[in-house]
Amino acid sequence: MASYHLSVKTIKRSAGRSATAAAAYRVGERIECQREGRVHDYTRKQGIEETFILTPKDAPNWASDRSRLWNEAEASETRRNSVTAREWELALPSEISAEDRSQITRQFAEELVSRYGVAVDVAIHAPHREGDQRNHHAHVLTSTRKLEAGGFTAKTRVLDSAKTGGVEIEQMRGLWADLQNRALERAGEVERVDHRSLEAQREAALERGDQLSAEELDRDPELKLGPAANSMERRAKAMAERQGREYKPVTERGTVVHAARQARAAFREMRERLNIARETYGIERESGLGRVSAGLAALRAATAKDRDRTPEDFRERLARVVGRSPDQDDTPKPEGRNYARERLKEIMEKDAGRDGQAAVHKLDGHSEYDIGEDTGREARKPSVNERLKDVLNKPRKLESEDEREQEKDRDIDRDPGLSH
């Protein structure tokens, strides 16, 4: 699924880095740094799909020359601890075309030029051949001074200030999310990205009454693997693929990350099934079916997508999502009780907008006139669960940049040789 990533870093002399080396690495070119007297040659670098430079309208002609541009940026700084460039790292959706990825990256770069009056050097990279093949990304290198007709002038203090820098970056994060979501919509994709924190997203879900999404967002941010663990896990995945077996994490951090990703995938699947069930129930009721018949149709629609798994397998996945292990036995459990289904029912009850009793009666085959009466009496109608017990328990058939490059947990490469 599409995922959001935007980070902002600085190229600092105090860290032994230079704008000339950073630019050379990202675009895979040879640039001679006049200040250092060194040559940065990355012409053998692979995986660079597109590069381009954008500048303000009144910028001098030499600004289109990458070597001249970044040597001038270096020359405009006189302090030993100067910040000579700023880098914006962007994750690009794999669900859209290469043309669309180029378009939204260019639109983001144009906004940087317009908003801050800086020079922008863009490099779009393909996924690393040994990494996640969905990991399309872009490196957007900007000057830290405005570029005008006479060359580089004032510093872009709005991004450096503690009072305004965070606000500016957050607004650019929001713009990048909007650009991606529009591209995903044009491509006919359902998935969307969100630049907000998990807590902010959860609060918004609660405000709109989306309890299931709020449950999914009630988690800690994903643990970062780190370069060593990330390299080990990539090798383990590649080995598993070659041997035709299921990938199993080989590090503690990898195990935690893998489990978290599986849980999120199960939550997304549960939400999809719930939406299918709701839509089907509403359609069947509008067509004149009774509550029980509409409920049966909704359940059939929700489970039709899962014909390659047994009901027990899906229940175990739902149990993991709500925080219970199939082997956990901390409370008495009557035989046959489905805790994952009960949790799903609780969420549906809250979504019903009432005290939950109406939703329970509807799900179990009662009419709304039965609410408040003794539903435990022996003469009540059989529930949907009771009617479908045999069906649900029937098994279904199976259908057929050098060393710094590894410092990025999501395989977005950095410039390993830039600490010169």
Image (cartoon, rainbow, N blue to C red):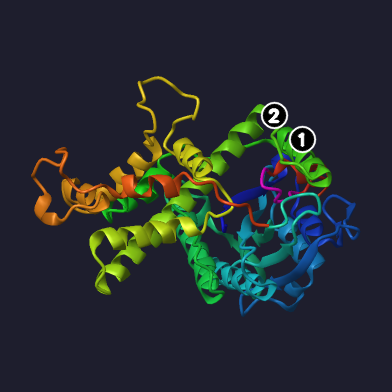
How far across and how far down the image is residue 335, in percent? 38, 28
> Which corner quadrant of the image does residue 60 belong to?
bottom right
In whole angstroms, how far apart are the C-alphas of marks 2 and 1?
8 Å
Quadrant in which the C terminus appears: top right
Whether residue 60 appears in this view of the structure is: yes
Q: Position of residue 97 (x, y in %)?
A: 66, 72
Disc 2, disc 1: CB below 8 Å?
yes
The amino acid on which the numbered mark 2 sits, given as a three-letter code, is: Thr
Query: Is 345 placed left or right of 66 in the picture?
Result: left
Position above or below: 318 against 210: above
Q: Which label belongs to residue 367?
A: none
Q: Residue at x 75, y 69 (%)?
A: 51
Extreme front residue here? Answer: 379
Q: Secondary structure at mark 2?
A: loop
Q: Residues within 10 Å of mark 2 (few under 14, many from 20)?
A: some
Residue closer to the observer: 136 or 174: 136
Between 370 and 25, the one nearer to me in the picture: 370
**Circle 1: residue type:** Met
Q: Which mark is residue 232?
A: 1
- Magenta region's main secondary structure? loop
Whether the magenta-drawn stretch holds residue 411 is answered as: yes
| Magenta segment includes 235 | no
| Residue appearing at x 70%, y 66% in the figure | 121
The percent coordinates of residue 275 (x first, y second) are 38, 59
**Relative to residue 344, is residue 368 drawn left or right?**
left
Residue occupied by mark 2 = 251
Give the percent coordinates (x, y) of residue 1: 57, 57
- Residue at position x 80%, y 40% in the image: 235
Position of residue 417 in the picture relative to residue 352 (left or right): right
Q: Write down the region rendered in magenta.
A: 409-414
Front in this rendered view, residue 179 or 112: 179
Q: Do we see residue 420 in this rendering?
A: no
